[in-house]
Amino acid sequence: MDEAAGWAAIEAALERVYGDVEPYGHLGTQVPYSVGGPDPLDGISIYRRTAPVPHWHLVGFGMSELYAKDSDDPAISGYGFEFSARVADHGDDEVPMWAAVLLQVLARYVVGNRPFAPGHTIHVAPGTFGAGTETELAALAFAVDPDLGVIDTPHGAVTFLEVAALTEDEYVAAKGGNTATVLDRISARSTRPLVIDRTRGSLL
């Protein structure tokens, strides 16, 4: 078996979506988490997209078992998911590094506390969407990435868990098991479904 079979399975999923288009960039860690590095994601691939609106698509590598099968559950790989996020591209050619930092923060939360699943929400601290950024966004919600979905890997299933952003009133409305309904309502009222746009206000 490929010694990085889990990593290869994620790359194969990305290839099914992006074909032979190379990532706009790939962020790797200097010291892998498995040997004492601080960041659970060994890498984040970043793609630039124009549809349905211009945005950056970030996909993490590290919540699933990238190299070897270490967990006892043969049905899922690692925590059973990998993070993805879509961030509005306002045409400045700058990769949204704050979003990559956010994915690493979420990964550390998973390792230290609990995993996320579709439908979960979490309130976030000021500065989450970029230090000094004025925004109405105040929370995160999680859904299955509509393009990448769920894949089978040699180490078990992996769900691509997309990170969406909510304003305070959207977060309140999503609590109690209503996340999918709120995300559907936001998508219906926005040209940027599930794309994190720091400039937007509430869509409820």
Image: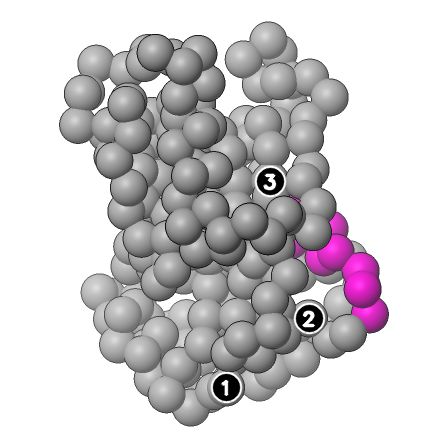
* Dot 2 crowding, Cα within 10 Å, few <14, some 14–19, many 20+: many
Q: Earlier in the sequence, mark 1 or mark 3?
A: 3
Q: Are marks 2 and 1 in contact (CB under 8 Å)?
A: no
Disc 3 designates what residue? 44
Q: Earlier in the sequence, mark 2 or mark 1?
A: 2
Report the residue at 40% width, 21% height from top.
5
Query: Residue 39, located in which quarter of the rendered image?
Result: top right
Residue flagged by tag 3: what amino acid is it?
A: Ile
Q: Is residue 56 magenta?
A: no
Q: Earlier in the sequence, mark 2 or mark 3?
A: 3
Residue type at the position of mark 2 = Asp
Residue 119: image x %, image y %? 28, 59
Residue 146, how many percent across, how many down?
Answer: 35, 63
- Please say if the residues under marks 1 and 3 sit with CB atoms less than 8 Å apart: no
Mark 2–mark 3 CB contact (< 8 Å): no
Q: Residue at x 50, y 86 (%)?
A: 191
Which numbered dot is residue 89?
2
Which quarter of the figure is the N terminus placed in?
Answer: top left
Residue at the spot of label 1: 191
- Whether residue 123 is visible here, answered yes or no, is no
Q: Is residue 49 left or right of residue 173?
A: right
Can residue 185 be seen here? The reply is yes
Identified by mark 1, the residue type is: Thr
- The verdict on residue 95 being magenta is yes
**Circle 3 Cα neighbour tier, 10 Å, few/some/many (<14 / 14–19 / ≥20):** many
Q: Which residues are magenta?
A: 92-102
